[in-house]
Image (cartoon, coloured by chain):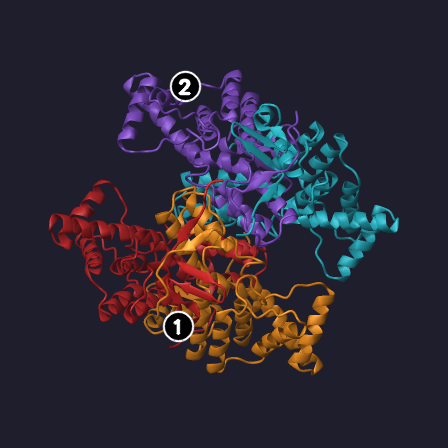
Chain colours: A orange, B red, C purple, D cyan
Amino acid sequence: MEDLHWKTGITKVEPNKICLRGYRVDKLMGKISFSQAIYLALKGEFPSPEVGKLIDAIFVSSVDHGAGPPSVLTARTAASTGAALNSAIAAGVLAISHYHGGAIEEGMRLFIQIAKKAEDKGISEAESVNEVMKELKEKGKRVSGFGHRIHTQDPRTEKLFALAEDLKIAGKFVQIARAIENYFKDAGKPLPINVDGAIAALLCELGIPPEIGNAFFIIARVPGLVAHIQEERTRMKPMRKIHPEDFEYDGPPEREV
Amino acid sequence: MEDLHWKTGITKVEPNKICLRGYRVDKLMGKISFSQAIYLALKGEFPSPEVGKLIDAIFVSSVDHGAGPPSVLTARTAASTGAALNSAIAAGVLAISHYHGGAIEEGMRLFIQIAKKAEDKGISEAESVNEVMKELKEKGKRVSGFGHRIHTQDPRTEKLFALAEDLKIAGKFVQIARAIENYFKDAGKPLPINVDGAIAALLCELGIPPEIGNAFFIIARVPGLVAHIQEERTRMKPMRKIHPEDFEYDGPPEREV
Amino acid sequence: MEDLHWKTGITKVEPNKICLRGYRVDKLMGKISFSQAIYLALKGEFPSPEVGKLIDAIFVSSVDHGAGPPSVLTARTAASTGAALNSAIAAGVLAISHYHGGAIEEGMRLFIQIAKKAEDKGISEAESVNEVMKELKEKGKRVSGFGHRIHTQDPRTEKLFALAEDLKIAGKFVQIARAIENYFKDAGKPLPINVDGAIAALLCELGIPPEIGNAFFIIARVPGLVAHIQEERTRMKPMRKIHPEDFEYDGPPEREV
Amino acid sequence: MEDLHWKTGITKVEPNKICLRGYRVDKLMGKISFSQAIYLALKGEFPSPEVGKLIDAIFVSSVDHGAGPPSVLTARTAASTGAALNSAIAAGVLAISHYHGGAIEEGMRLFIQIAKKAEDKGISEAESVNEVMKELKEKGKRVSGFGHRIHTQDPRTEKLFALAEDLKIAGKFVQIARAIENYFKDAGKPLPINVDGAIAALLCELGIPPEIGNAFFIIARVPGLVAHIQEERTRMKPMRKIHPEDFEYDGPPEREV
């Protein structure tokens, strides 16, 4: 029989000892935040406290966006049929795809392409943006990470970029995102950076590979899905017809932190 | 046509303004941790800083447990066939069920049952433990949250309970868990509290409903699944036969935080 | 390392030869129907031609039930976000649970319980129905497999039972189902057998174990889900809001076979 | 509120009447096979009896391929954790992707591209095969649907093509598949058509759109997954470590139909 022995560099488990990327989990507990542990698991290295704060903000920004997104509707619909908690979560995750949550990976690939072109050709990021945007237009391709169905100025974007400035993490990728926004404004078709686009730029600054960019959205959104599943189970009748728009918020009124 | 109007108390979305449980998301960003936001989403109220710290420790404890658990094997196997990131995550989540991760909900139900019996009958928690354990034994039922295939003394349990003591959160449910551990020891069959049992006791202390107890494990583990999916995609050949045990760790050696 | 060798009795694969339950697949092809192969895979034995016909009718009865069922809504919603075909199918399957499709397993367990009680106590099936129905009523339990939101007389039920009579497969379980229907009628609350209840009775006649009863619904419905996914992808805009009721049929008008 | 009214051409549901693509389901039952109903659901038109027979053979060919494929391993692993039947099926379906089952869609796209080039340039299919294969080689692209890890001459392929000949369905796409096989043989690197490639060619002959080609594999394989899930649940211990290769068949010995 074939030798199936294989290697993994994530976690070492021995009797009474577990090390994540080399760090003892029991020593990490109480010392680092969940966000820092996520970064450690995904990047393999510890985030600085600044990076930890930014990651926290990214996750907080995307925990929930109301009852309308497709991932919430599939999770609630599955829950409504009596599905187990993990099944309903999985149904929600399966609806986080190209058009919902998918803009992060695509935005990252675009920003990286623009940065690479600037470097390869010795031109500025703004010039590279102009070239790439024209190419995309000629090919009839959509630009991911800009514009929103509901928000003309997404409050999460401004907050993320302001935080990144404060924490000295904003760099060329944030500039590229801004330059694209300006490109659209100059073209008379303003499409502000949305939260996916902002997260994409920041994950590029942090050196996260684009193929796991969407994971940041999925990780952030799973708790929101759980809140909706629980509300569906405890407050609604099974097998109700779930209207995708005709709902109103009746939770606590606006309050200060 | 039937009126399908419905209500939700989780998040209010208006143009350029998003409120989670009444709090503006852009104001939460930079101020609270992801763990606090998760607690807010699930409980509807803000955690105190102490509770926030404990929740962080719970999530950090369960981010990853190596390549062997079934959820990792299903996620890697799906990834190995070329599945999309969200599909591979969903495949992992579908294997977090009764016997893997499920001990949290079951443990919570047991602890709540014991606490209720103590209250109803005016007996001590230790007496209630004795009664309930005997009933379970007679019915041939397994007790969830105790014993582990690998760890005789799970380092995560001790750390969680120590933290809960320090943060003044440990109460009757931790006592109940300890009393069950003692019951097994006295019966000559030591089955120490495992990490699921410890989390179950702490979530009871926090007043989390048992039916979303497993969600805390799922939320914690999704980032670990992403790390494994990414490693599978970047380091392994597609469609390899994934041995469930014959792997070795080759990541960074043990290091201090 | 532990010996992980294990055994399976379903399919033997050798170079250039595949045997399903002992039969060479290449010899089965062209000779038996898909339904017969499904029965062979699940039961381990060949169906008689009569059983093959009945199984075909069961599957045909449940291929699709329009755009309203939750499994269709989750599959379409996932597809609408750009999910891969297999992901959208999986999202649909995750919404086939307790309240949707789940009545088959529950109906089977009820019919088997009634038949067993009749046998154990030496009473008629009708008497056993009366006893069990009274017990369920006292416990406030719902009876699965009877009544339908849309159909007062489900045309599929009558056809299935008529076929089972013709094929000499109808027996005590069909009688039990009829007796329950009569029980409801006599109680002044007519709840006719629905298609799930009818399938449950017939699968009992065929000796299928109840724990895979719902599989017959899932197997039947996957092709319907695929039709809806394909229609969603080719005819609708991505990310549309999918109304769960406000749709109309615009396919071919009624026609004869 | 936006008008969300929409249209669907698959199934019309009225009280006591269900029409699939215009045909009353209760009249279809007992008259057509499951395979014919699947074709009707997916294509919108009735298959001739010949096409019905070929579709049956396609499905029978792919019901199961032993315990080794990734979809079986994920389904069994999920089942082993105590997952619900529909969850375990979904986990299996999520592992039917690019490298496992995915060859059907890719093969169809290749065959259609070759046929189109032959038509556009007025050259023979064999000439078109030569041109396209050279292009693929230059781009370093893999050809889907040819070669198999276990079978040097897949018995299912020969049977499918022989049936298609008998039923007068084999046409230019079967010729193209054969021409590719010859191309590899002439290049000294024999890669026989595998069952995915054969199904791809036949679905092209039937005018099925390539984007649902893999659905035929998924529909065929779900019953096989159910058989494995049931065996896992009834014969194995929960949470066992499932070796992906070290299993042996202990079912009925080879027998004749």
Quadrant location of the C terminus of chain A in the rendered image? bottom left
Give the chain of mark 2.
C
Rendered view: D37 above or below B194: above
The residue tagged 2 is C175
The reply to whether residue B247 is in sight is: yes
Q: Residue at x 50, y 74 (%)?
A: A158
Question: x%, y% of residue A135?
Answer: 72, 69
User: Along the line of sight, which residue is nearer the eye, C133 or A31?
Assistant: C133
The outermost residue toward the left is B122
Q: Amino acid at mark 1?
A: Tyr
D149 horizontally vs C153: left or right: right
Q: Secondary structure at mark 1?
A: strand
Q: Residue at x 23, y 71 (%)?
A: B166
Disc 2: CA contacts within 10 A as few (<14), some (14-19) or many (>=20): some
The answer to which quarter of the image holds residue D44 is: top right
Disc 1: CA contacts within 10 A as few (<14), some (14-19) or many (>=20): many
Q: Residue at x 57, y 70 (%)?
A: A193
User: Along the line of sight, which residue is nearer the eye, A110 or A4?
Assistant: A110
The residue tagged 1 is A23
D62 horizontally vs B123: left or right: right
The reply to whether residue B74 is in sight is: no
User: Along the line of sight, which residue is nearer the eye, C28 or A162?
Assistant: A162
Looking at the rendered image, the disc whose residue lies closer to the viewer, 1 or 2, is 2
Question: How far is mark 1 from mark 2, CA to CA?
Answer: 65 Å
Numbered label attached to residue A220: none
Q: Amino acid at mark 2?
A: Gln
The outermost residue toward the right is D122
